[in-house]
Image (spheres, rainbow, N blue to C red):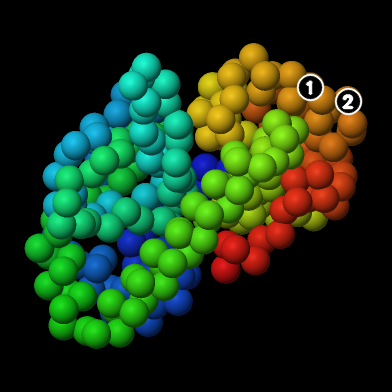
C-alpha cells in the first residue's frame, strides 16, 4: 500500500517523470540547492515573502494557503512529491505550509533562470506545468463553488489517489490529511468533514482504519465526486 504523501524523489527524477529530457534534468540536479525539512506545524514560507527561490518537493506534500480578514484559512493548492513551486517577480500573496513532514530542495531564482535562459525548450516545458496547475485550480474552484459537501471530499480523495500514484487496483492509501486540512481545502468545518467521512463509510464507498482508507467502490466514489482525471494530464 502506498502513502499519498509518496516516497522520496530527486529533482532530476521528478523532471524526467514530467517529460523533460534526462540531460536537461541533470542540469537542475546539479544546480546549487539545499535540502530543508518542512514541519506541518508551522508555515514553511509566510505570505508576503519574496518569491526569489524555486522549490522541488523531494518527499511529502506542500500546500499553498491564504487567510481572510478573520484569520480563516483556505488551502488553495497542493504540491505532491515531485512537484515544484517556481519563482516570480512579485512577492507571494500566499503562504506555504507542509501537509505532512516534508523534504524540500530549495534553489535560488538566479541559478534556476540561468539554466532556463540557455535552453528555450525549458521555458515551454515549465509553461506546460503551470498550465497543468492552473487546470487543477479551476477544478478546485468548481469543487468548492458548485459541489455539495459529500462530493467535495470524495473528489479530494480521488484526486489525491491519482496525483500520488496510488494503484486503484489495490484500493487503499494512507490518508495524508487531518480533518482540519480537508476542511481548509474543501471550504467546510472540521466537524462537517467528520460527518461527511462517516457518510462515505455508511454508503460503503470507503472504509477507514486509522489513517488507512480503503476504497470499497472506486467507480461509485468517482461518480459521486464527478471525478474525471483528464485535468491532471
Mark 1 lies on residue: 198
Find numbered disc 2 in the image and state the secondary structure of the residue it sits on: helix
* Quarter occupied by residue 84: bottom left
Element type at marker 1? helix
Q: Measuring 24% from the left and 32% from the top, which residue is drawn there?
A: 46
Disc 1 and disc 2 in contact, CB within 8 angstroms: yes
Q: Local crowd at mark 1 within 10 Å, few (<14), some, or many (≥20)?
A: some
- Asked if residue 119 is positioned above or below residue 151 in the image, the reply reads below
Is any atom of residue 37 visible in this view? no
The residue pinned by badge 2 equals 202
Q: Nearer the viewer, residue 107 or 204?
A: 204
Of residues 39 and 183, which is closer to you in this image?
183
Left or right, 166 with reference to 93: right
Q: Position of residue 137 (x, y in %)?
A: 49, 52
Q: Quadrant of residue 62?
A: top left
Label 2 packing within 10 angstroms: few (<14), some (14-19), many (20+): few
> Does 79 sit left or right of 142 as displayed?
left
Q: CA distance from mark 1 to mark 2?
A: 6 Å
| Image x and y of residue 21, in percent | 37, 82
Amino acid at each position: 500500500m502506498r502513502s499519498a504523501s509518496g516516497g522520496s524523489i530527486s529533482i532530476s527524477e521528478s523532471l524526467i517523470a514530467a517529460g523533460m529530457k534526462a540531460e536537461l534534468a541533470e542540469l537542475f540536479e546539479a544546480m546549487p540547492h539545499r535540502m530543508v525539512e518542512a514541519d506541518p506545524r508551522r508555515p514553511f514560507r509566510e505570505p508576503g515573502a519574496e518569491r526569489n527561490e524555486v522549490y522541488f518537493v523531494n518527499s511529502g506534500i506542500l500546500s499553498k494557503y491564504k487567510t481572510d480578514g478573520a484569520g480563516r484559512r483556505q488551502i488553495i493548492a497542493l504540491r505532491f512529491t515531485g512537484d515544484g513551486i517556481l519563482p516570480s517577480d512579485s512577492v507571494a500573496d500566499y503562504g506555504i505550509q507542509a501537509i505532512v513532514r516534508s523534504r524540500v530542495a530549495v534553489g535560488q531564482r538566479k541559478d534556476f533562470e540561468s539554466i532556463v535562459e540557455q535552453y528555450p525548450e525549458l521555458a515551454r516545458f515549465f509553461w506546460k506545468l503551470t498550465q497543468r496547475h492552473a487546470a487543477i485550480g479551476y477544478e478546485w474552484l468548481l469543487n468548492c463553488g458548485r459541489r455539495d459537501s459529500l462530493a467535495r471530499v470524495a473528489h479530494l480523495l480521488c484526486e489525491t489517489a491519482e496525483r500520488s500514484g496510488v494503484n486503484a487496483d489495490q484500493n487503499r492509501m494512507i490518508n495524508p490529511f487531518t480533518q482540519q486540512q480537508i476542511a481548509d481545502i474543501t471550504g467546510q468545518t472540521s466537524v462537517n468533514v467528520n460527518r461527511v467521512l462517516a457518510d462515505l463509510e455508511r454508503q460503503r464507498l470507503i472504509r477507514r482504519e486509522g489513517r488507512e482508507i480503503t476504497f470499497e467502490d472506486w467507480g461509485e466514489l468517482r461518480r459521486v465526486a464527478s471525478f474525471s482525471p483528464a485535468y491532471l494530464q
